[in-house]
């Protein structure tokens, strides 16, 4: 049976055997190969049959590549722009100018931090109003300089705090969605890890929305839904299933345009391979968008969001 | 009805049994039994203690528009339960019950009417319908209302009473934030004024999209205005919430709204705004 514990135990056995073979020259090569094959088979089975809750946990995996790391791997160069010019700068939502596949682009991304100190400063990727205002500022730079905009999303949601409320977090998110929808440059969003509610869609209302295979995109965390609707925190796995938050489900629903495959075991197993897959997918979509006449591109974007969710209802297409 | 009681801020729970209109209603704040007609004449404010009763969309419309000028333009749409969602209770059942108890197809009514002789397109949300939450149908009705306002070239008035996005429609609800913002982009480009009236509650995904983008934003006295709920804030940050946090007066003090208006003055306040904006949009 392919379950996490069996796989973990087998991984340890393989590692131990490999150490014996390689370091101490014990002749167990055949056993090693056998075990490795069995491990791979189990892993393949396991990752083919992931539940939505498994994916939630993978999306939150502590070793998953972070926004900044991924941008560095995906882009040839990144020059960070800082500050919202209104008194704030947010390390949880960053961005700037970058070189992508040989061309200049604007980039925005959530950052959760790598070290524990950085993670505290980034509030695990929960951005503040000044973060979203900085995002809007960078969107406007991209618009002025006619740079396509790439966004990388990984946030549990916007920061729920007293000061964030006083500084109008709701309005900052609304403005970010509004400006993103009005840009004349092509926009491609990639959900890397967690796409948590308003804090995510503020960067995700793009021409194309791509998701890493184990990323999630949801109106509320499964824990939140479990607490509100099931009145039971233990119902989070059921809530995850019911919310249809996984990349494959969202591709079916037409919310995501493409699911970017992750290496066996998740993005953290091979960050460079993951980054390459992201780069390839983004480039393909960007090139498609750049082929379209401006009018058509904007019409498609408007129509995508104006008609969102209408499939299956009697609403007329606008 | 899952409505929070708060006598201090003057919003109270309304007892409503399905399918019947009680002659008498009990004030949740002071316990007084009030004759329904008397309550209506008093803008659904308790004549004894001044508490605000929740308004249905129909009641809100009647309180705001000139008599006999309202024309219902709500689209004949019902949620098709796109995710076939079920928690402890199937979403389809919740929808059916909400439709039966409110007489509405979903949590918003759209229509044309006059306020002080000014033509407006109105969208009025109804908290009784699954907390006034925004799923695909509510998003579509709001966008439809803005489209109609663009075509008619008359101001758009939105009365918000919503806890946020509807959980049971998942990301499709989240996308309604983008849908309504896209429709508002068209409204803005057409130069059509948009006035928002925030009531109890105006929070979550609705506040983080369409409700935050008006040209003029009024708050009904006592309204709850914000993004994250107080409990989420306390659980995540452990912060102590300041007195009056996320209430209308607090929102005004922090620059989030243009004015706080008592319920009985809302119609008059809207007339003032519409008077000043007479002739806008130009050629309208
Ligand atoms: Zn009373």
Image: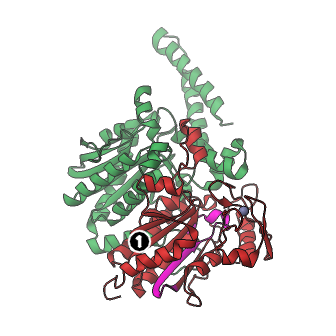
Chain colours: A green, B red
Q: Image quadrant of ligand 1?
A: bottom right
Mark 1 residue element? helix
Chain at numbered mark 1: B
Q: Is residue B192 left or right of residue B14?
A: left
Across and down, in percent, residue B249 comes to 50, 56
Across and down, in percent, residue B119 comes to 46, 86
The magenta segment: B113-136
Pointer 1 residue:
B184
Residue found at x 55% / y 45%: B243
In the rendered view of the protein, which quadrant contains the N terminus of chain A?
Answer: top right
Residue B120: within the magenta? Answer: yes
Q: Is residue B23 above or below residue A203?
A: below
In the rendered view of the protein, which quadrant contains the C terminus of chain A?
Answer: bottom left
Q: Residues within 10 Å of mark 1 (few under 14, many from 20)?
A: many
Nearer to the camera, A171 or B280? B280
Q: Is residue B99 above or below residue B120?
A: above
Q: Is residue A311 visible?
A: no
Q: Is residue A205 left or right of residue A30?
A: left
The quadrant where residue A75 appears: top left
Residue found at x 67% / y 71%: B44
Q: Is residue B197 left or right of residue A208?
A: right
Q: How many marks?
A: 1
Q: Residue furthest bottom?
A: B68
The quadrant where residue B162 appears: bottom right
Q: Residue furthest left?
A: A145
Across and down, in percent, residue B36 comes to 75, 75
Q: Residue furthest front?
A: B48
Nearer to the camera, B30 or B65? B30
């Amino acid at each position: 049976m392919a379950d996490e514990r069996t796989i973990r135990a087998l991984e340890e056995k393989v590692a131990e055997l490999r150490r014996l073979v390689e370091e101490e020259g014990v002749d167990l090569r055949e056993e090693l190969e056998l075990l490795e094959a069995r491990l791979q088979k189990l892993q393949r089975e396991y990752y083919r049959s992931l539940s939505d809750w498994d994916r939630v946990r993978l999306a939150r995996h502590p070793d998953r590549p972070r926004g900044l790391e991924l941008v560095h791997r995906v882009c040839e160069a990144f020059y960070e722009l800082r500050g919202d010019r209104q008194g704030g700068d947010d390390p949880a939502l960053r961005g700037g100018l970058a070189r992508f596949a040989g061309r200049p682009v604007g980039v925005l991304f959530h950052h959760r931090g790598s070290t524990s100190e950085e993670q505290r400063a980034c509030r695990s990727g929960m951005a503040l109003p000044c973060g979203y205002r900085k995002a809007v500022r960078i969107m406007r730079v991209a618009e002025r300089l006619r740079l396509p905009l790439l966004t990388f999303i990984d946030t549990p949601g916007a920061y729920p705090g007293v000061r964030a409320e006083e500084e109008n977090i709701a309005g900052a998110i609304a403005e970010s969605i509004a400006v993103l929808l009005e840009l004349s440059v092509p926009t491609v969003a990639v959900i890397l890890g967690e796409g948590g509610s308003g804090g995510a869609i503020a960067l995700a209302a793009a021409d194309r929305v791509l998701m890493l295979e184990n990323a999630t995109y949801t109106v509320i965390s499964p824990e939140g839904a479990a607490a509100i609707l099931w009145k039971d925190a233990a119902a989070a796995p059921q809530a995850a299933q019911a919310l249809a938050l996984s990349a494959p489900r969202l591709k079916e629903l037409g919310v995501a345009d493409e699911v970017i495959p992750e290496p066996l075991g998740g993005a953290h197993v091979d960050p460079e391979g993951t980054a390459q897959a992201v780069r390839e997918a983004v480039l393909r979509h960007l090139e498609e968008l750049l082929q379209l006449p401006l009018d058509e591109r904007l019409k498609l974007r408007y129509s995508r969001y104006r008609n969102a969710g209408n499939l299956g209802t009697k609403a007329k297409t606008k | 009805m899952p409505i929070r009681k708060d006598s201090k801020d003057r919003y109270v729970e309304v007892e409503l049994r399905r399918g019947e209109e009680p002659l008498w209603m009990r004030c949740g704040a002071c316990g007084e039994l009030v004759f329904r007609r008397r309550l209506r004449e008093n803008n659904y404010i308790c004549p004894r203690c001044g508490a605000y009763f929740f308004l249905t969309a129909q009641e809100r419309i009647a309180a705001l528009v000139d008599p006999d000028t309202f024309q219902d333009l709500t689209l004949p749409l019902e949620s098709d339960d796109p995710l076939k969602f079920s928690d402890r209770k199937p979403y389809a059942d919740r929808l059916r019950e909400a439709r039966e108890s409110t007489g509405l197809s979903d949590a918003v009514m759209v229509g044309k009417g006059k306020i002080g002789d000014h033509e407006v397109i109105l969208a009025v949300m109804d908290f009784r319908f699954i907390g006034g939450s925004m799923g695909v149908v509510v998003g579509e009705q709001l966008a439809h209302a803005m489209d109609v306002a663009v075509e008619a070239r008359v101001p758009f008035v939105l009365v918000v009473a919503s806890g946020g996005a509807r959980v049971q429609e998942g990301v499709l609800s989240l996308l309604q934030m983008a849908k309504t913002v896209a429709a508002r982009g068209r409204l803005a480009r057409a130069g059509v004024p948009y006035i928002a009236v925030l009531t109890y509650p105006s929070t979550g995904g609705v506040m983080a999209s369409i409700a935050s983008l008006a040209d003029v934003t009024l708050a009904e006295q006592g309204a709850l205005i914000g993004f994250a709920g107080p409990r989420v804030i306390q659980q995540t940050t452990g912060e102590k919430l300041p007195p009056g946090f996320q209430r209308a007066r607090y929102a005004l003090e922090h620059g989030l709204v243009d004015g706080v208006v008592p319920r009985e003055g809302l119609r008059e306040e809207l007339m003032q705004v519409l008077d000043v904006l007479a002739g806008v949009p130009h050629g309208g």
